Amino acid sequence: MNLYEYEAKEIFADYGITIPPGVRITKPEQLAGIHFGYPLTLKCQVLTGGRGKAGGIKFGKDLKDAQALAKDLLQLSIKGIKTDSLLVEPKVAIAKELYLAVTLDRSRGCPIFIASAEGGVEIESSGKVVTMPIPYPFHPYVARELAKQLGLSKKVLNKVADIATKLYQCYDELDLDLAEINPLVITEGDDVLALDGKIVVNDDSIDRHPEFQGWEKDHLAGLSDREARAKMLGLNLVELDGNIGILCNGAGLTMATMDMVKYFGGEPANFLDVGGGSDKDKTLFALDIVNENPDVKVILLNILGGITACDEVAGALIEFIKQNPHRQMVVRLRGNNQDKAAEMLAKSGLKLIPDLETAVKEAVAKSKSIASTKEVAKV
């Protein structure tokens, strides 16, 4: 779950990371009640990157100018996402910008610091990126060593190291996927503060954190309607450009199935992982949401029954095909209660294909046959 900048900064402040004073507004008239002095910084609050390049950050020289800018910004859409609010802060006199983040390095199997002496830019284009594994338990010397490698010294080194330590504590205690400050600025008075921030909360950890529960509904901007509805039910759906709807359980099995579809010449219309332990109702919802995509010509269901019982899935399939008798389906079910599922599907007329490669080839062939028939019909 991605958080808005103002939410990330509130969390940073809770952990003792210095941030500029700020107020979130939804109407230009609210600027009259803000007394930070001018110029003011006005920043669109949207859950997407590239805000600065899209004109989503402006500086108001006085109240009249700031209100005119706020009116324009509150009508701005960035990458298709409408701006609902602005974060208003005093303009900061910047002497130097840094980049600082904590995330998980899966290859090393541990969290890492990513830092750069060049902040405020796309980190991929910086030639001065430093990465550093973070030991467990954490030791503050790691943060000081990081600050040294950024070329810092004396009081500024200690301040940056202190913020790096607090950023790691925030990442660790809140089960984050990413805690990022960009830019982390050193002011002309040698203060160090987080001028912008990004936090990504691990979706699977939200149940452990009451402070985030109920937030998901307000943080779905940028997702399609189907993707948002799926997420609210705990399904991982990513829509793609192909015509084979894919429904599996487990991210690895879903990706492997997609790879096989591509290998045999097909095009996936989506990635949909229903997760482990899905019952009949949840599976039926997943089938319906894949079926809603008008580009889907064939649904390929590949479920490995472990916690999920194959007969529960078969029950959903039978209900689905009653409601959608013309939908082309290819079904592979293996595992827990597989024989029972096979009996149920045989009575419904649905064919069960035990071998994955055979199932994928059939789904690809059906999708091409339907597409070819439609092309001929157009001629």
Image (cartoon, grey):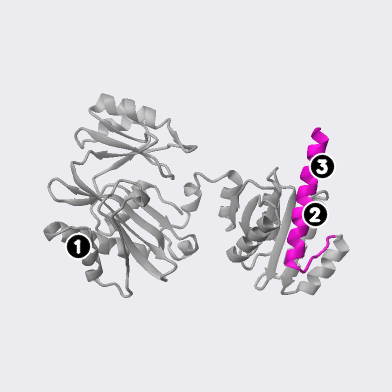
55 w.r.t. 320: above or below: above
* Residue indicated by mark 3: 373
At a point 80% along the width and 54% down the height, the residue shown is: 321
Q: Is residue 227 visible?
A: yes
Q: Please, what is the three-letter code of the amino acid marked with disc 3?
A: Thr
Disc with the residue nearer the chain's start (2 vs 3): 2
| Other-residue count near label 2 (Cα within 10 Å), few / some / many at <14 / 14–19 / ≥20 | some
Q: Nearer the viewer, mark 2 or mark 3?
A: 3
Identify which residue, 74 or 145, lies in the foreground: 145
Residue 49: image quadrant is top left
Q: In x, y percent, where is residue 24?
A: 33, 40
Mark 2 vs mark 3, CA separation in Å: 22 Å
Which segment is the magenta one?
A: 350-379
* Residue indicated by mark 2: 321
At a point 76% along the width and 48% down the height, the residue shown is: 368
Mark 1 vs mark 2, CA separation in Å: 64 Å
Q: Please, what is the three-letter code of the amino acid marked with disc 1?
A: Lys
Residue 330 is left or right of residue 5, and the answer is: right
Q: Please, what is the three-letter code of the amino acid marked with disc 2?
A: Ile
At a point 19% along the width and 34% down the height, the residue shown is: 37
